[in-house]
Image (cartoon, helix red, strand yellow):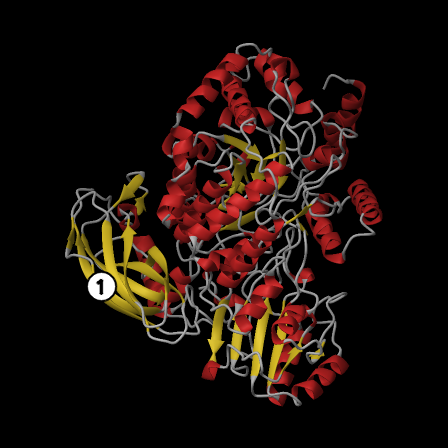
């Protein structure tokens, strides 16, 4: 089955008679519900369960985290990775999987995720996460696919179709423009319409149209002033009316701002449960004429449809955990990226005299921290795998650094480096395992820099000096700087490779697997080099996307700024030649482009090659990046084998979003079709004349000038006036901290006496409750609490705090003591 067939196979499920039957059943059930029952369906029963309707034979259904492995918890759950969960296969994280560029692999992985979910009676798996990697320091980048929306959307669609082929639902997240962890619950993402459509919504659009996820999860943040949980333009106008989404929209956990506004906007389900408070708000709003009951009916109907779908879950007779482990091993191997391999030092012979250096070889860093943290069924380490394959139970080893307690550049131990240097001098080849410890990247906080720990950097430099035949194996969830890059002979990026990563890395080092992965994100030389860096992460309450379209390679390739490694880069143990590109000379209106080329394996090793297609619009009157990814194909070739590869580029890839016409427009003119091994390694090209009957609106000269100037001088300067031209209106001012309100954060109110006492009390209780968990999870919980809006206290309290208490607290914080007394006396408020 081809990749495209696997992507589209199950999208048809939503069009079949099964869905028609479910819709009819849902309508029948809806007609039997009271107003109170309809309202009750709009929020969860508890942390992971939806409410039931027992009298109508609708049982409660379970949802669980799981972008790269099921994280099912008990009744006393959490969404931060603090509590324990059932053992499940931990696959590589999204940042790794994206580098496989393999929809079929993602489909197969989705099937495995669904099998485990069904076995645990989980009806909806909360993933995948597909937010764009706007900046390399986003703490959650390990959980996202790419900086490119096309690659993101295609891989997400494949994974969703794989999961849903087993009738387990997915929750595509986080919709939308959620690209940082700093103040993610309250920040306002200000982005112009063209950038929103072309960069931040495109991946979601592809996934919705090709896979129809059962649910979509709305993000915490605001977009252009409106919370995503009550954003009618996003949730109804675009998602449902324009893209044809047929499923349910659920909040991220604790992301509900105003429940009544959410229903009117198209938000269906609030999670976790609110102990009935928001249900009462809905009933009151309908009774008082503030909410049309027909709007509530739409929401309730969609929740009922989800409950009915959940009854169709297909359980496997037995979960083949061994097969899932081997799939995790395959996925890790195919996701690894060979960044450098001078003198073809890799692969090593099994008889090679080499030493293993770095504690990651024995204590692997294999996944990120937070809501996606999986309790693995088993865990392989690279040292044991290398020992077994080489039949050397006493393989030379030195720790080089300590994993436990590594808090960054303040944790230096020269004695460990010295010990490793002594060992490195006694062997022919030194294999150094290094990267980012848990404390450097996690949900809840962003990275302050792109550096690896100083201990790791010093270790690599020292080993390279002691032994010129040094190989570096990296474990990290996102891009890092490599100030030592000129010193080792080889660098293999293995990402966060999941529970079987140790086996996969050993396979790659010893040549049992040939690395074929290619970067799904650019590795910049410095943080400041990224176009978004000047405006990232913004003020405490607002972040401006002034760089527009110029994210990742779209910026670096347009301005010619050097990078450490470009988007799409990846070496192999063999060599591939490209030839015989055929595109045709002209493309008729409404016609897609199908191109062919020949790829030949010129080496002695079988392997994968990933051919990438970029489009350069030669004649555009509107500013565009110098080129953009428009298609790709992954092909396996035996030594000496040649194969003709066909790649389809759809019509939309030639278009831009015309804000004047509020539509996608293809300008007639010449496009250069580039076939490449990376965004900076163009192998073949041809010019195609694209015919079009579209009538583009007049280009904005001011906006064109901003980005044309950027391309000429490698500097992006977007003034307030320029940004307003991009937006088409005045840029909003960031919210004032005072007066305090329901979306004031715990950190903000700590400037007051009462707020400080509350802040300290919550932090102390949290510290006591989490004293027995790891330091990284403790850190991410503290960071999330600092940015928690006051309304989140109601969700956190499990019924101990209500909205009335919240309003009293806000009045006291604002020194409105008379209002506070009135609220205390009048219990109906």
Residue 611, given in percent of the width and then of the height, sits at 34, 62
Q: Position of residue 716 (x, y in %)?
A: 41, 62
Above or below — where is 723 with respect to 248?
below
- For mark 1, give the secondary structure: strand
How crowded is the residue under tag 1: few (<14 C-alpha within 10 Å), some, or many (20+)? Answer: many
Residue located 70% across and 44% down the image: 86
Q: Position of residue 550 (x, y in %)?
A: 40, 58
Quarter-wise, where is residue 83 in the image? top right
| Residue 766 relative to residue 617: left or right | right
Q: Tell me: 668 left or right of 23.
A: left
Instruction: Identify whether 630 is placed above or below 640.
Output: above
Q: Is residue 389 visible?
A: yes
Residue nearer the viewer, 381 or 143: 381
Quadrant position of the C terminus in the picture? top right
The image quarter in which residue 608 lies: bottom left
Q: Which residue is mark 1?
A: 581
Residue 729 visible to the viewer: no
Q: Nearer the viewer, residue 204 or 267?
A: 204
The residue at 20%/45% (across/down) is: 591
């Amino acid at each position: 089955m081809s990749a495209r067939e696997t992507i589209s196979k199950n999208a048809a499920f939503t069009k079949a008679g099964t869905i028609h039957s479910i819709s009819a059943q849902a309508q029948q059930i809806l007609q039997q519900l009271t107003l109170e029952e309809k309202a009750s369906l709009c929020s969860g029963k508890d942390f992971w369960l939806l409410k039931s309707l027992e009298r109508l034979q609708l049982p409660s259904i379970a949802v669980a985290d799981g972008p790269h492995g099921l994280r099912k918890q008990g009744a006393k759950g959490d969404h931060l990775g603090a509590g324990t969960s059932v053992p499940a296969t931990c696959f590589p994280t999204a940042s790794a999987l994206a580098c496989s560029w393999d929809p079929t692999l993602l489909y197969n992985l989705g099937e495995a995720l669904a099998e485990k979910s069904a076995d645990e009676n989980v009806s909806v798996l909360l993933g995948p996460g597909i937010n764009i990697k706007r900046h390399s320091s986003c703490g959650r980048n390990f959980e996202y696919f790419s900086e490119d929306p096309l690659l993101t959307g295609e891989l997400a669609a494949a994974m969703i179709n794989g999961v849903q082929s087993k009738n387990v639902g997915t929750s595509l997240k986080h919709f939308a423009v959620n690209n940082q962890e700093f103040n993610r619950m309250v920040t306002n993402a200000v982005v112009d319409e063209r950038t929103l459509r072309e960069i931040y919504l495109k991946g979601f659009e592809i996934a919705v149209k090709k896979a129809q996820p059962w649910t979509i999860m709305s993000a915490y943040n605001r977009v252009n002033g409106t919370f995503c949980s009550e954003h009618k333009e996003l949730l109804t106008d675009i998602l449902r009316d324009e893209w044809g989404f047929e499923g349910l929209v659920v909040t991220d956990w604790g992301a509900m701002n105003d429940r009544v506004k959410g229903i009117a906007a198209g938000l269906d389900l609030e999670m976790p449960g609110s102990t009935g408070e928001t249900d009462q708000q809905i009933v009151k709003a309908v009774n008082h004429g503030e909410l049309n009951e027909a709007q509530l009916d739409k929401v309730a109907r969609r929740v009922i449809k989800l409950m009915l779908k959940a009854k169709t879950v297909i359980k496997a007779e037995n979960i083949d955990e061994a097969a899932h482990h081997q799939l995790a091993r395959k996925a890790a191997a195919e996701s690894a990226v060979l960044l450098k391999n001078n003198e073809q030092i890799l692969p090593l012979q099994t008889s090679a005299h080499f030493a293993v250096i770095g504690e990651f070889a024995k204590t692997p860093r294999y996944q990120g921290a937070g809501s996606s943290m999986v309790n693995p069924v088993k865990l392989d380490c690279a040292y044991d795998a290398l020992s077994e394959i080489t039949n050397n139970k006493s393989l030379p080893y030195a720790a080089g650094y300590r994993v436990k307690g590594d808090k960054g550049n303040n944790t230096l131990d020269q004695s460990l480096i010295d010990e490793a240097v002594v060992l490195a001098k006694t062997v022919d080849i030194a294999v150094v395992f290094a990267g980012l410890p848990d404390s450097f990247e996690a949900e809840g906080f962003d990275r302050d820099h792109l550096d690896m720990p100083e201990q790791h950097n010093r270790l690599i430099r020292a080993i390279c000096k002691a032994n010129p035949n040094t190989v570096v194996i990296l474990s990290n969830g996102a891009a890092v700087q490599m100030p030592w890059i000129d010193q080792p002979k080889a660098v293999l990026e293995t990402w966060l490779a999941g529970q079987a990563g140790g086996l996969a890395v050993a396979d790659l080092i010893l040549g049992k697997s040939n690395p074929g992965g290619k970067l799904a994100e650019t590795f910049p030389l410095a943080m400041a080099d990224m176009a978004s860096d000047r405006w990232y992460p913004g003020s405490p309450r607002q972040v401006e996307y002034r760089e527009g379209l110029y994210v990742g390679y779209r910026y670096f390739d347009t301005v010619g700024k050097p990078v450490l490694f470009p988007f799409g880069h990846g070496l192999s143990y063999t060599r591939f030649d490209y030839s015989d590109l055929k595109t045709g000379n002209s493309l008729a209106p409404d016609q897609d482009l199908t191109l062919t080329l020949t790829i030949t394996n010129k080496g002695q090793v079988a392997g994968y090659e990933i051919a990438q297609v970029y489009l350069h619009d030669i004649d555009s009157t509107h500013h565009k990046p110098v080129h953009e990814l428009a298609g790709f194909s992954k092909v396996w070739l035996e030594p000496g084998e040649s194969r003709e590869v066909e790649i389809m580029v759809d019509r939309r890839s030639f278009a831009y979003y015309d804000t004047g016409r509020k539509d996608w427009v293809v300008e007639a003119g010449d496009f250069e079709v580039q076939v490449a091994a990376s965004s900076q390694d163009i192998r073949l090209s041809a010019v195609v004349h694209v015919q079009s009957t579209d009538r583009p609106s007049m280009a904005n000269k001011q906006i064109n000038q901003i980005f044309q100037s950027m391309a000429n001088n490698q500097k992006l300067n977007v003034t307030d006036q320029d940004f307003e031209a991009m937006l088409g209106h005045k840029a909003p001012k960031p919210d004032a901290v005072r007066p305090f309100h329901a979306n004031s954060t715990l950190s903000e109110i700590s400037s007051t006496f009462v707020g400080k006492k509350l802040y300290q009390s919550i932090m102390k209780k949290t510290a006591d409750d989490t004293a027995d968990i790891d330091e990284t999870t403790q850190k991410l919980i503290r960071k999330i609490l600092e940015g928690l809006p006051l309304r989140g206290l109601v969700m956190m309290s499990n019924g101990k705090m209500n909205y009335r208490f919240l309003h009293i607290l806000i009045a006291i914080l604002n020194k409105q003591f008379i209002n506070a007394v009135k609220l205390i006396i009048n219990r109906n408020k």
